[in-house]
Amino acid sequence: MEIITSSSSLSAKVEALKKAAKSIGFVPTMGALHKGHISLVNIAGKNTDVVIVSIFVNPTQFNNAMDLERYPRDIHKDAKLLADTACELIFAPTVKEIYPEPDNREFDFGQIDKVMEGYYRPGHFRGVAQVVSRLFDIVQPDKAFFGEKDFQQLAIVRELVRQLNSGIEIVGCPIVREADGLAMSSRNMLLNEQQRNSAPVIARTLSESCKFAASHDVEDTVKYVIDTVNASPELKVEYFNVVDGNTLQSLKAWGESDYVVGCIAVFAGEIRLIDNVVYKKN
């Protein structure tokens, strides 16, 4: 496994691999890797010949400077975790390498970036689109692998690829959870003991809401989830939306869509956690 910091060096490696008819799998990350990331790498390894993992904390997708500052970074620990996986190349560029000039590009994703994360984190998906498109230009993958925990981001990336007409296949991968149900996230390591003990309430409530939803309408289910999570003194719901899984627009009734997903964002102190649950997918 090799760590590359230069985009030109990586491009040369990729060109040689493609000449050798090797398919490229790509897992973009911001580091602070955990078993969830490793699962993406393993899935990529089963579906492509060569796996490249990027480690880059992208400043343009943070609308909170403190969130960017406290985001965990440990490239040596990350490399050690990747050593026993299908990863062959780590791309760990500097900000200047990704953005040699200021990136002022704007993107039009219709309504899918106006709700939930897009509403509460203005500019976030513009930053996601900037960095993902830059990384795709450099890595030139055949397939790219993203976790379904970031449900809205996955929808944004798929729309980005459609607009770019790049031909890259975007593969959504299942959420990986801790033994107590908490969705794995790099931010989990920032939780204090009390917050960490309370955080599994999020996943447990989402799971229990599936049974609740069978005999209640959407409005009652939304209230049930918010009230149950907020009952924990360490947790505060920012939003919980029941949406169409394709358009991400809120639903008023279960029958309005064949693909229904509940998406949640919760603060544990200053740490923001997201998760989702699929109510229906035909």
Image (cartoon, rainbow, N blue to C red):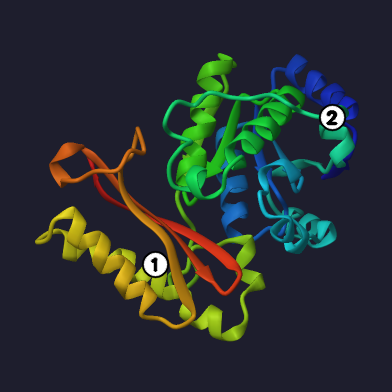
In the rendered image of this protein, does residue 276 appear above or below residue 70?
above
Q: At which x and y percent is residue 225?
A: 30, 66
Instruction: Count neighbours of disc 1 (C-alpha within 10 A) and say few if under 14, some if 14 to 19, many if 20 or more.
Output: many
Q: Quick check: 179 above or below 3?
A: below
Q: Type of residue at label 1?
A: Ala
**Residue 10: image location, x then y, percent:** 84, 29
Q: Which residue is disc 2 drawn over?
A: 10
Q: Image height check: is 26 above or below 265? A: above
In 3D space, how far apart are the residues under numbered discs 1 and 2 (Cα atoms)?
Answer: 39 Å
Toward the viewer: 59 or 84? 59
Q: Residue at x 90, y 33 (%)?
A: 6
Q: Residue furthest bottom?
A: 194
Mark 1 or mark 2: which comes first in sequence? Answer: 2
| Residue position marked by numbered label 1 in the rendering | 203
Label 1 residue SS: helix
Q: In this image, 1 relative to 204: left or right?
A: right
Could you say which is closer to the camera, residue 134 or residue 90? 134
